[in-house]
Each structure stands twice: as structure tokens, then as C-alpha cells.
Amino acid sequence: MRALQLTLLASVMAAPLSAQETRELDAHVHGVSTLELAIEDGIVEMSLMSPGMDIVGFEYSASTAADKDAVESALRKLTVPENVVTLPEAAECRLAEVLVHVHSEDHEGHDEDETHGHGDHEKEAHGHDEHEHEDHNDDAHEHDKQEHDDHDDDAHEHAEHGQHNEFHVRYKFACDHSDDLSAITFPFFAQFEHAQEIEAQYVTETGSGLAEIERDAPQLSLE
Amino acid sequence: MILRLAAQSLWARVLTVGMTILAIALSVALFLGVEKTRTGARASFADTISGTDLIVGARSGSVQLLLYSVFRIGNATNNVTWQSYQDIAARPEVDWIVPISLGDSHRQFRVMGTTDAFFTRYKFRGGRSLGFSQGQGLNDLYDAVIGADVAATLGYSVGDPIIVSHGVASFTEHDDQPFRVSGILAKTGTPVDRTVIVGLEAIEAIHVDWKNGGQTGRTTPAEVIRQMDLTPTAITAALVGVNSRLQIFKLQRWINEYPEEPLLALLPGVALQELWQIVGVAEKALIGVSGMVVVTALLGMMAMVFASLNERRREMAIWRAMGARPMTILGLLVLEAMLMAGIGAILGYCLLYVGLLGLRPWVDSAFGIWLPIEAPSIRELWVVTGVVGAAALASLLPALRAYRLSLADGMMVKI
């Protein structure tokens, strides 16, 4: 009973706190994806965040069948790292983990769902380590479902609401010769015609750095 | 043979040729100087911090935070509460964290409050650690460690008293609580050389009698202050090292999305690149302008050669009479121009090195940029080749004219 009272008290106290929401939005530029790349002890971890505009050409949640197909096929493409990134052969890298999902910025509940998704998926991906990439496609389907249909109403007003869908991709590679990771190329631009630029932040043995990977020169060189 | 001819012909007109060479030399020196300063500044900045994975401060621009916290340049950023600092320190990704507190000064030098860990964690120039040339680190509340430039400029040695001023360039002194120099750091070529380092608690201690930016009038004796809880309420920034590089971005995102306080975590290398992207425009403009100066000098040389053609008409005619082909005369003029440009470029180099030797200490102390004096780089040799090549091209015009004239004039020159 006492515990219940405490819980009640806690929830009453928590209410005004949650009402005091912070309003902030991340920077969002159409045509510019961001890449975070870290290399340590033969492990290459990269996460790519692309605005929906770059990948499928629209940023509202997919409502029509055609839109949904587009999102689905994009997700399928992204689950195959070869479509996005090419590591030098000399480095002898093997794929260890893939994580792909669509992220929409303005629904808090949705975000939480996705966090759970992360965890589940990660576990799955670990289990799938040695499998073919096709397996991952199933996962992508699952993630499609996370796109709730309740976005539909907002779809046409997305400009005013600042609603933006983002594709998040995370790859993890294990490399035998990570010293040979001198340059990484991005077939990404060939796959997604709306993508113009990737802003890459990287951390390697020698420190951190920033590079812009352009459609014309889709390569990131790491000294 | 023709080279000797060209050299002697130049020597015969030493005054005008000398002026032309001087103009080329100055322009080359300017161009190379701009280039040198640019690369020197970049190297200096890049060498100033290494081994630190993240720098955390109040949310501002990453360039501003980096410049203020590491280089002590530019506008101050807001402070970070001690509580947020401890939240970050408690993160599992964090291997080490060193707080930094700025705001006071000693003479023209900044005073930085930090912890002893700074001396082991701060790395510069590709992982070198700080070393003491005299004395040791902070053992007492009122100990201060000074950088090499501070010691050299103010003539301090270990054991000397130091009085910290409140704020920067102010006349209010914390003279009730003098510090003692406990150690002098070896020269690093970084802003640390121009910093007085004290303990984080010491920064609190000297502000015990200060409330809301003013002195309260009371003077709490040092013995009482030593007994007080001197945990700071705020710091300026913190240097963070993570356990694994793979966690940097995760930690960065956590800090940037920290709900209780608007914070900013930056990767030093990334922030520097951002800075270069901004500065790059100005750099290009500078290179453009200094390049135009070289072009102007070469145009001046061209004008000089044109002007000399008339007075040398008879000379040309004599050469023709002695069997020189018109082609030889063209070659002679181009060779003369290349000689002038070559001598000018080499002289420009000498000027640059003399200038570097003279200005280096000043640039170092005023801007914290260490300009290395080294053998010319491949790029700089290309500049010299380019200048000589451009001179050859520029002289072609007057040379072609001489070629035509010498064909037409023959011996019968009517002047």
C-alpha cells in the first residue's frame, strides 16, 4: 500500500516535469547525409543517416502503395552494405552487423518503439553473423512495420511541422588488415540518385577528422 | 656561351635589372610567406591537441568551444555546471575526464584551473606529454604551474609568488591569496606555454570572498578557506578520453542530447576541419592576392624588357652582323628573363627566411603559431619553377618583337 502511495506521489510529481518539454530539432539538409565512422582494432563501425529525400525522394511517411514500395526497396538496398560502401579489398573485411531502419523525428512514442527495435535487431544481427545478406532482408521487412500509419494525416503538412523521415543505417565490419583502410568508396550515390553529399566524421588511430564526400568524387580517404 | 652573354648583358644594365629582380623577389617572398603562414598555422593548430577524444562545453559552436577551451582565442563560452560534469564523468564510456576552468589572468597570461590529471592526459604534437623543466605539479592548494613562455617573459622560477587577477586585463587582484610557483613546464609550442595552471579548487578559493562578480569586502583567511568545501559549481569545459573509439559517437550524441543542460561535445579534429573550411575562403583570397603580386612583378619585368628593346636595337643589329640568327636573339631575351626570375625567386627565398628568423618569436608569442624553418618543400620548388616558367612566357612577347625587328632592321638602324 505504501509502495502504491509512493508510486502515485512519484507520478504526480513527474507530471509537471514532463509537461515542461524541451523543443529542439536537429539540423536537416536535403541532399546531405551524415556518416560517422570509427575504426579501432580491426573493427570498422559506420552509421549513415540519410534524409528520406535522398533515399526515396520524399520525406513524409509512406502512405500510398507506391511510396511504401519505394521505402521497402530502399531498405532492402540498404541492408546490403555493398550497395552503400566499398572497403578496400586488401583490408579483408567481413560484415559483422547490419542495422537499417526509418526514423521519423516528431513522434516521441514512435522513437521509443524504435529504440526497442534497435536492441532486438542487434541481437538478431549478431545471431546472423555468418549468414548471407538475404537473411537481413527479412529484418528490413519487420522494420517497415514500425512506420505507423497514423502519420498519414500529417503527411501533406510535413513542411510546416518540420517532420522529416530519416534512414538510419549501421554497419559493422571486422577487418584483418585495418591498416589498409586507406580509402573507402561509396556506391551509395549510384544507388540513390537523390543523394548529393555525405558529410563524414571519422575517428581513427591518428585522430578525428571531417570530410565531404561528393557525388562527383564518392571517396573518403583516411590518412 | 649564350648563358654568359645573357648574364653579362644583364650585368651591363644592373640598375634596371636589379630593380626588376627585387620586385620579383619581394613578390615571391610574399607569396611563399603567405603559404608558409597558412601551413604553419594549420600544423600549429593540429599539433596543439592530440589524444583527447571529445571536448565538452556549453552548447555553442564547435569551433568557438574549441578555440576558447584549447586555444584561449575568441569569445568565452558559457560555463557547464559541476553536476553535468559529474554525470558525464560517470558514463561508462568515459575513460578519463579533465575539467578546465578559465576566466582569471596573471599579467597578460591566462590562468587555467584544472586537476593534476591534466599533466598526464593533455597530449600535443602526435601524443607527446607535458614535461617539467623545473619543479613539479600541483601539490598544495596555492600551487601554480606555469608555462615556458610565462616563466621566460616574467622571469619566474620555482618558489616565486604569483598574484592572480580577477578576470582578464582587470586591475582587481586576488592579492589576499598569493600563489607559489611549484613547477615550470618545458616548452611545447602550444597555448599551454602561455598559461598559468592552478588547481580547480584554487579557482574556487580565490573567489570565496567574491559574490556576483564583486568583492564582498570580507577577507577570509587562507587557513579557513583550506577547511572549506571547495568543490567548484561550474567549469568552462572538459577534455574527455573514451575507453574505445567505437563509443565516441555514442557518447557525443548522449552529451549533445543531455536534457538537463544544453551541452556540446566535439571531436577536436572535426572542429578543426570545420575551422579550416571557414578560414579556407580567406586563405584562398590571400593566396590569390599574393599570386597577383607575383604576376604584377612579372608584368613589370615584361615592360622593362620591352622598354630595353629600343635602346638595344643597335646591339641586336651587331649580333646579327656577327652571325647570330634571329632565333638566337629570341633565345637570349627569354634566357635573360628566366635568369632574372630565377635570381628573383632565390632572392625571394632568402628574404623569406630572413623574415621568418626575424618575425618568428613575435608571431609565436602574439598568435601562438610556430613557423618552422625547413628546407623548401616540393610545393615551394614548384612555385619557383612556375615563376621562372611564367617569366619565360612573359618575355616571349618582347622577344618575338625583337625577333621581328632583328629580321627587318639588319645593320641599317635608324634611331
Image (cartoon, coloured by chain):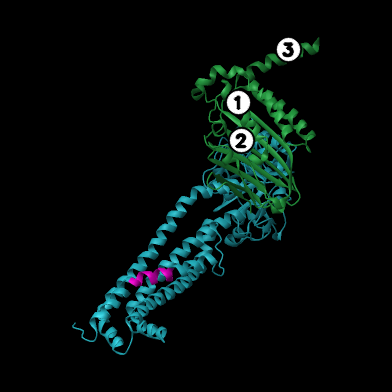
Residue under mark 1: which chain is it in?
A: A
Dots 3 and 2: beta carbons under 8 Å? Answer: no
Q: Amino acid at mark 1?
A: Asp
The quarter of the picture where residue B310 lies is: bottom left
Question: Of the residues tagged 1 and 3, which is closer to the observer?
Answer: 1
The residue wearing badge 2 is: A49
* Circle 2 Cα neighbour tier, 10 Å, few/some/many (<14 / 14–19 / ≥20): many
**Which residue is found at the position 39% from the left and 83% from the top?**
B7
In depth, the one of B11 and A200 nearer the eye is A200
Q: Is residue B77 left or right of residue B282?
A: right
What is the quadrant of the C terminus of chain A in the image? Answer: bottom right
Inspect this view and state whether residue B28 appears.
Answer: yes
Instruction: For marks 1 and 3, give the CA distance.
Output: 46 Å
The magenta stretch is B387-396
Vertical position of residue B231 compared to residue B25: above or below: above
* Circle 3 Cα neighbour tier, 10 Å, few/some/many (<14 / 14–19 / ≥20): few
